[in-house]
Amino acid sequence: MPHECIAYSDFTMLPWSALIDMHVVARIVPVVERWDSSSAWLKNYLNVSQSEIALLKDSLPYQFQIYDDPMNQRYPKELGSARLIHFGSLFGTSRLRLKRKVNRHIRRQVKERMIYSNQLLLDISRSISDSLGGPYYHGIHLRLGDGEFETSSKSNVHLVCWSLVTRLMGLPFDETREVEANAMRWNVSSEWPAPPPVIEPSENPNTVVSPNMSPLSPIDMTNLGFLSSDRSALCRQYQYPTSSNLTRLDFPVYIAADAPSSRTNPSLDLFLRTIPCIFFLSDFTPQLHMLEAVKNEDDGLPLKPFLLPFIDSMVAAMVNRVIGTPHSTFSRFTVDVMNRRYHGLPIIERERIVSSEAMDTQA
């Protein structure tokens, strides 16, 4: 294989319209889908010369903050008369520090329409969600696989699991600590990690408890034919005694995680040893079979590995109650946008507090 082709299958390109309804977005703001990244394309298609382009190159996340009102003299940089503002990244809508009501309204409209609308992805996600009892299971969106999330995976798993058990399942703190100690074989009090703070809707953007939730219905634990017989038996066999307050932990939990081999991944031990009935995307092979034939018409690459994270987050977002990973924009999108829209609720918008290190350059 030629050297330049080694990473050929590591990425692919799709139009935004393959995932979201761009027709609706285009009615709010004009949109041109660009497939050619060259400056020649800008000249030929938009009639914009290089001297008329303001190029913003990000070297740090959130390095550029975009304001719609005159700013403090501390940040004197202006875009001048540039006809085109060329962003290196559009990562993070909270970098838009908007004060004008009309602009905030437009941003909100666009964000509300960013939910995935691809019919195949919706059909697969709903099929999996229905197999788990519709919205009546708990959802977790867990980032563990790279960067800061890999470094802080242990503390994040503890935080999210603790919040799941105490906040969503309603187990008292002292019983939760005891369950953790028994599950992880912490034999002496000195081995127990300090209880983390509970992720509350009022404190953290990554947990939402919908205000109009319906009462949770019991799941028929005998109707798990979509799982392997071993997994189905495990989900029933190791439930907590009915006489115990710990039956609260028997409720099904779906975890969307970027950890490989989730069911045997050591990073997820606390969940796997504590919660009797956990599900991952890998448990739903029959539903995912429809993705096998899906290929990118342009480069011929199979799209299944690229689409799985979307489906994973969609299944987690279809529940009534979902918890995300702190500081993850993907979790924030899953919780604040998708979960809310799936239940007919207004999205949650939050301003990000950016450190001074990342505020050196403003626009």
Image (tube, rainbow, N blue to C red):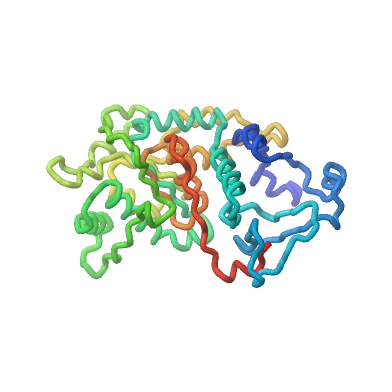
Instruction: Say whether residue 231 is visible.
Output: no
* Residue 176 in picture, x, y percent from top left: 23, 55
Which x, y percent locates residue 27? 66, 35
Q: Residue 241 location in percent, x, y?
A: 16, 42
Position of 255 with respect to 173 (left or right) is: right
Q: Nearer the viewer, residue 106 or 18?
A: 106
Most distant residue in the left direction: 243
251 or 345, nearer to the observer: 345
Residue 133 appears anywhere in the view:
yes
**Residue shown at 64%/35% (left/top)?**
22
Tally of marks: 0
Quick one: quadrant of the C terminus?
A: bottom right
What residue is rendered at 65% in x and 56% in y? 68
Name the residue: 43% across, 38% down.
Answer: 345
Note whether 256 is above or below 64 in the view shown. above
In depth, the one of 183 and 201 nearer the eye is: 201
41 vs 145: above or below: above
Q: x, y percentage for residue 335?
A: 45, 46
The image shows residue 311, relative to residue 123, as above or below, that is below
What residue sits 48% from the left and 40% below the top? 338
Q: Is residue 361 left or right of residue 262?
A: right
